[in-house]
Amino acid sequence: EAQVTQNPRYLITVTGKKLTVTCSQNMNHEYMSWYRQDPGLGLRQIYYSMNVEVTDKGDVPEGYKVSRKEKRNFPLILESPSPNQTSLYFCASTSGGIQFFGPGTRLTVL
Amino acid sequence: GIQVEQSPPDLILQEGANSTLRCNFSDSVNNLQWFHQNPWGQLINLFYIPSGTKQNGRLSATTVATERYSLLYISSSQTTDSGVYFCAVTRGSQGNLIFGKGTKLSVKP
């Protein structure tokens, strides 16, 4: 089954404790991206990757890092999380302009 | 940057009713997609429709790119249609999606 998976689905952590949210797709897509969704602000792109080892900033990249060492994986890294990064995070994989979203990761930073 | 506006922001329907959701965008776009976010937060791709008309069961969508708007039609609504409907457009060559704020739909039995 074609899908985008994310882990963990839920995470509560504390300020400053590094964390990684994994994202994997099995559709051999080149383009992947990360979004965050916040009440009143909608979904905003954090980072995207057009292929292996090619990444670039989206609209709200501050406080995040990404890597793309393999085509299927695109982890989102928060080196020093802060409470303003509490949000619902989505990974997406794109082919032909059509975006497929993962199930989401609900992150709470205390 | 491109602005995406959706209307209405909230909509309450009785089961079986029809509805039209609108998406206006401020500049030329390469792609346009409609998504449904269900009450569990999952984003479901409904239509990829940069122009023209498409139909999928009770749902259909029309995009008039020259006039910078798209419409999503829901006929014979069901309670499972509840959730938030998002319109999103791409400004670049791939997928830098710009989302509207969404229309929150509640279908009452």
Image (tube, rainbow, N blue to C red):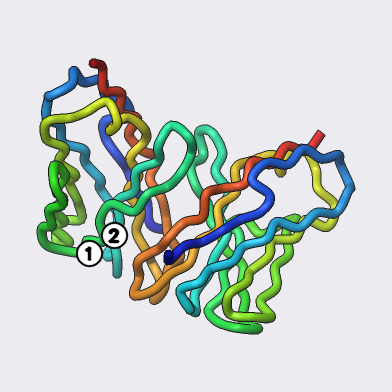
Regarding mark 1 in the picture, which secondary structure is present there? Answer: loop
Subunit that carries the residue with mark 2: B
B102 vs B17, left or right, is right
Is B10 left, or right, of A74 in this rendering?
left
> Which residue is at a point 48% across and 35% down the rendered structure image?
B40
Looking at the picture, tell me which residue is in the foreground, B64 or A107. A107
Secondary structure beneath label 2: strand
Choose between B42 and B85: the one closer to the eye. Answer: B42
How far apart are the two marked residues, 1 and 2, measured between alpha carbons? Answer: 5 Å
Which residue shows up at 46% across the image and 44% down it?
Answer: B42
* Contact flag, marks 1 and 2 (Cβ < 8 Å): yes
Q: Nearer the viewer, residue B35 or A39?
A: B35
Residue B43 or residue A59, whichever sits in front: B43
Q: Amino acid at mark 2?
A: Leu
Q: Amino acid at mark 1?
A: Pro
Left or right: A85, with B25 as reference point: right
Task: Work out which quarter of the rendered image holds the N terminus of chain A and state it.
Answer: bottom left
Q: To which quarter of the image does residue A86 belong?
A: top right
Which of the labelled discs sits on residue B50, or is there none? 1
Q: Chain of mark 1?
A: B
**In the visual, does A3 lie left or right of B61?**
right
Q: Quadrant of residue B17?
A: top left
Q: Which residue was labeled with disc 2?
A: B32
